[in-house]
Amino acid sequence: MMQWIASDKRVPARLRLIVAWLMATALSCLLLPSAVNADEPSVPAAPDKPVVVEAPAAPAAAAREQPAESDELKEAEARMRQAEVDYLRAKIDYEQLKGQSAVASLQQQLKAAQTELVRISPTTDDEGFIKKWLVAGPIAMDEKVGNHDEESCKEFLDKQYMNEGATPKEGDTVSTGDADLPWQAVAGGDFYVPLDPVATDAGKNAEHAAFVGVVYVSSAGDLADVKLAIGSDDDSVWRLNGKEVIRVYEGRSIDKDQNSSQPLTLKQGVNVLSFTVLNGDGPCDAAARFLDKDGNPVPGLTVSVKPPGQ
């Protein structure tokens, strides 16, 4: 809830600034107790009680425990970086309302924080949701996309912004006819990736706009009877290796597994998954994962924002 308040443009900037600061402070405090306890002096044992020396843990057991601790610390750091990003966005809005000259410096800090967030964030979570994408946008659309019906949105979802067989990388551009927009790596703090901040961070309008995304999914072998499960806010079309597998005409908020494809096959090697999401107004988000025939996340997939050979 606090993360939503900190990042939603409809909430007053002063309130988002305060909430984002509280989130960052709280997460920082979670990482402090171990450091504080390490500096505390040890209390000597009472002289009339024997000192019990515990046998050291077996090295193999310690080695097994270390990865779990490392993953936990990485997750905590990612949450802290996300709070930092939300705080800087709110701070920029606040300073812009005040007309202060600190905005340029804050925008540089925001860019650096986003880069670090992308670097440390996992590509998927425990439920198989893809947490990092290459995203380009916003692409200005006619206001009629706010109707969220086939008649109004079909022509915009039919358009493909990636050439067949294309494998863009961060820094490449998408030609929209009016402008060339850069592909940028974006990380989501939850099961979905937020798209509207891509626009607002660049000082552009996220409403009545389209966002395109792509990610590379590698499989060690052919996997049949797999389904793509997605969520989107709002209308969207999803393609796997250039073939359309899901299309949605609906204005809605993001949720898990709102739509699923027919059974499909992930080929051995690299599969290119892409989306186009249309935004009427308000937030804009996208979520996706692959499920097996029993509805469980497909194991063993490798997901990357870098194309093959990069």
Image (tube, helix red, strand yellow):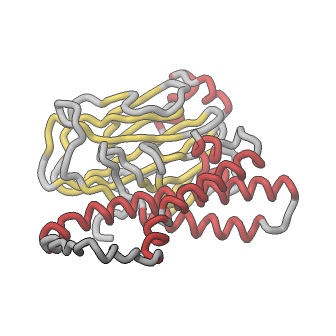
Q: Residue at x 40, y 74 (%)?
A: 43
Left or right: residue 72 compared with residue 197: left
Dividing the picture into quadrants, the one containing residue 240 is top left
Q: Residue at x 71, y 66 (%)?
A: 106
Residue projecting furthest to the right: 99
**Residue situated in front as seen by the camera: 114 or 148:** 114
Q: Does residue 231 sit above or below 302 in this rendering?
A: above
Q: Is residue 178 visible?
A: no
- The number of callouts visible is 0
Q: Residue at x 24, y 40 (%)?
A: 297
Q: Does residue 93 sit above or below 283 in this rendering?
A: below
Q: Residue at x 53, y 57 (%)?
A: 27
Left or right: residue 113 compared with residue 55: right
Left or right: residue 258 compared with residue 80: left
Relative image position of residue 301 (x, y in whole percent): 22, 52
Q: Is residue 233 visible?
A: yes
Relative image position of residue 280 (x, y in whole percent): 62, 32
Relative image position of residue 310 (x, y in whole percent): 33, 70
Q: Does residue 182 sit above or below 289 in this rendering?
A: below
Residue projecting furthest to the front: 48
Relative image position of residue 171 (x, y in whole percent): 50, 67
**Residue situated in front as seen by the camera: 148 or 293:** 293
Which quarter of the rendered picture does the N terminus lie within?
top right
**Residue situated in front as seen by the camera: 67 or 168:** 67
Q: Does residue 133 sit above or below 242 in this rendering?
A: below
